[in-house]
Amino acid sequence: MNPTNTPTTSFASPTIVPTLVPSKQRAAKREHATAEQAVVFGSQNHLVGIYHPTTNPVDAETAVIFVTPGMLHNAGPFRLHVDIARQLGCRGVASFRFDLSGIGESLPVGASGRSIDRASDEIREAIDWLQEQHGIQNVILFGLCSGADDSIHAAQRDSRVSGIITMDACGFSTRRFRWNRIRHHYVPRLASLDAWKRLSRRVLGKTSALAWLLQLLPDSSSPEYSTMPIGSDLREYPAREIAEVEFQSLVDRGCRLHMIYTGGALEIYNYAEQFFEMLPGVRWNDQATVDFYPEMDHVAILCEDRKKIVDRVTERAVEFAQQG
């Protein structure tokens, strides 16, 4: 049932503009967000996004698209995408954040096959919407984790992507990476009594004499929890040789890159220069830059880390937009 005085909106409408009625106390805080536009788009009207316009644009034909990471919706981890989008708006760059199909408010409609290909198709549809509705000709993609993988893959398939900014994208081993792993990861464990206890239990069994003697020694670390298995991320980035070809094609067509790596990616990336050293066959032509924040976690949850990421991504996106 629907009261006659209550407006209705079809989910399949091409555009939905929400009516915001904040309290007087919240009105001032949300004043900057009143122009944000919720939209439904895509070939089957199944994708939902939020368009962030801007006044006095740096380049009226350039906007940023936020690509969702993993199963998170378009607000990003702890509203990271919202924070960056609003700061971009204040700096003269429009942006668009949307849910990939089956995530957040977007319906699980789409082609079968690899998720990375489906994401590329939906990013293309987001670019199409920006082009048709706002005259956007060039986009800068921002993606974290799997969103970084999707951004790089989508850029291969759409020449309208003029820039990519990623967090914790692909990582490939180098000689220095392996040495760092030995020095910082494995060597400290040689001096860990608890590590030797765990090893003895796995190799010799809990009933062996050595394992029994080691159990008599005092613990030197926090308890070992075994109820949760070690998880693994599902990442779809290519082999090193293919990655070199793909990055070279992006650079050759003038696509600018800014790669951010955090301490959350130490399993694949552990020093600042690794990005360039792990892809030695690419001629970068000053088109790529890298930041490495080993003290920061994967989603920049701390306030000071969040501010650093928001400021840095905004700075690079504005520079990319200014360069056209």
Image: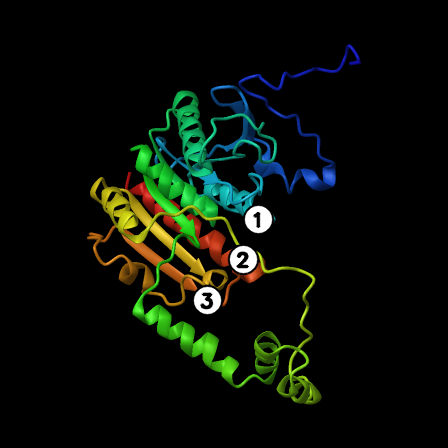
Task: Look at 75% across and 15% down and name the residue there.
Answer: 6
Looking at the image, residue 15 sits to the left or right of residue 218; the answer is left
Residue placed under numbered mark 2 in the picture: 300
Is label 1 in contact with label 2 (beta carbons under 8 Å)? yes
SS assignment at label 3: loop
Task: Look at 28% across and 59% down and name the residue there.
Answer: 276
The image position of residue 94, as x and y in percent, is 44, 35
Q: Is residue 58 visible?
A: no
At label 3, the amino acid type is Pro
Up-down relation of residue 207 to residue 69 (above or below): below
- The residue lying furthest to the top in this view is 4
Q: Is residue 220 visible?
A: yes
Question: Would you identify the image quadrant in which residue 36 lies?
Answer: top right
Residue placed under numbered mark 1 in the picture: 77
The crowding category of the residue bearing disc 3, from other C-alpha atoms within 10 Å (few below 14, some 14 to 19, many at least 20), is some
Earlier along the polypeptide chain: callout 1 or callout 3? 1
Task: Look at 39% across and 47% down and name the residue there.
Answer: 237
SS assignment at label 1: helix
SS assignment at label 2: loop
Earlier along the polypeptide chain: callout 1 or callout 2? 1
Question: What quarter of the picture does the C terminus occupy?
Answer: top left
The crowding category of the residue bearing disc 1, from other C-alpha atoms within 10 Å (few below 14, some 14 to 19, many at least 20), is some
- Of residue 224 and residue 160, the one placed in the foreground of this image is 224
Question: What quarter of the picture does the N terminus occupy?
Answer: top right
At label 2, the amino acid type is Ala
Residue placed under numbered mark 3 in the picture: 294
